[in-house]
Amino acid sequence: MQNDSLTGLLTFEDFLSMAGAAICDKSKAYMIVAADISDFHFININYGYDTGDDVLRDSAEFIGMYLPNTLFASRSHSDHFLLLVSIENVSYERVMNEVQRLKERLKENISKRVGGISPNINVGIYFVEDKETNIIAAVDKANVARRTSKGNYNIPCVVYSEHLMDIKENSAKILPIFDDSFRKESIRVYLQPKISSETKKIIGAEALSRLVDDAGNVIPPAKFIAALEKTGKIVELDFYVLSFICKLIRKWMDKGIEPITISFNLSRMHFYSPTLVEDIIKLAEEYNVPPEYIEIEVTESVFFEAQEMIVRKVSELREYGFKVSVDDFGSGYSSLSLIGVLPVDVVKLDKSFVKESLKSPRSGDLMKGLIRILNEIQLEIVCEGVETPEEEKMVNEYGCSEIQGYLYDKPIPTDEFETKYIKT
């Protein structure tokens, strides 16, 4: 038996051997736990490899301390850990609680090591139900669940199911389509208008991407965004969309048309690039596009990870002149105290606010109060997902006049958008 020289945990090969022998015991119940530290490379690059090694050693120690009944543990590679845990006579609820406790302790300790940054711990679990399961297949299933957990901050872990394997297979199909479309510059960019409910005129738009397969079928974001995020290719897509926006605005300006502000989504992965701010500025300058016509949308959950670093970069982008918005505010992580410190211009209220406000007076009062506070601190507010005149009337009465939703239009191809909304 050999141990990892850095952490003292089992080597991957020995873990497979010992865990594989254990799960053959048909009289006992086990689970495989796969975990990694989100964006661990950022710690190595910005704090040094010695600090990164300290984090890994601490993590190995915490695993044994805070996850009871761990039989074998391994650092399979880099910041990836595998555990075989006995769950004999242990409830599902207790498993989830113990995993959550481990995650919280790990995040707290990492934060102390690296100056306040608190990366998420991605955890996947496979409950070994079939005693004939090969250990390699069991580890693969735990890792499928782990990868699915990335970016999901409000659950302790993801438990493997056959549905996740379907998602994995879908990713395997999507990535070649994306690579081919990116190379051919055939990714489609759709625009969804933002409308003033008071004037009924367009005041902006959001850029959204679509892939097209060889048969000409349009693939919506729900089918490919997760796959691109897990492989890091989302960075390529975001800059593709930004480049498209810059070209489009430049075209309008060259024709003497006053541009509208167009927003695009910036993935959390971008913020770990040391040249993010410079790269965005360089692209705008390449097309000679005034930054006020570009709005950078950052999902609110992004600010809960490495907040200090992300706030700094967002501030630099705003100082240059770009607009910045918090997207999907209210989708699960919201905090008014967060809004108080974020350097943003726009808050986009998640569509769930609109839907829930019509269901009960209390939900309506909550939304009304939130809009009032945002107006008082002079933030621009956009209500997303408005689909009916009743919803529009309600949010307008509450104090929000900027609407994005199917009531006015769905995301449409750029040429169709120009025909309907831009006098070319």
Image: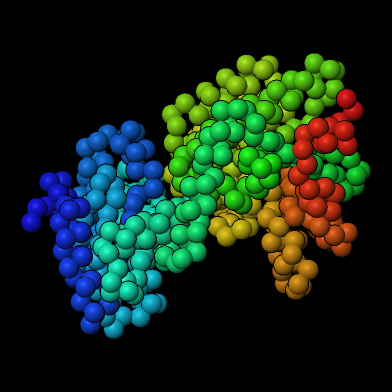
Q: Nearer the viewer, residue 271 or 366?
A: 271
Tell me if I can see residue 230 in this picture: yes
Residue occupying image coordinates x 65% and y 31%: 186
Residue sitting at x 20%, y 59%: 16
Picture quadrant where residue 248 is located: top right
Q: Quadrant of residue 250?
A: top right
Q: Position of residue 377 (x, y in %)?
A: 69, 46
* Protein image colouring: rainbow
Location of the N terminus by quadrant is: bottom left
State the image coordinates of residue 200 (x, y, percent, origin top left): 90, 44
Question: Is residue 58 among the parts visible in the rendering?
Answer: no
Instruction: State the count of labels.
Output: 0
Is 361 positioned to the left or the right of 28 in the image? right
Farthest-out residue, right: 199
For residue 304, above or below residue 70: above
In the depicted structure, whether residue 253 falls above or below residue 396:
above
Residue at 16% from the left image edge and 60% from the top image edge: 17
The residue at the far front in this view is 215
Say above or below: 45 vs 159: above
The percent position of residue 188, horizontal first and vertical second, equals: 68, 36
Q: Where does the image place residue 133, in percent across and percent down from the top left?
A: 30, 68
Q: Quadrant of residue 29?
A: bottom left
Q: Residue at x 77, y 20 (%)?
A: 251
Give the camera-side residue of 175 and 412.
175
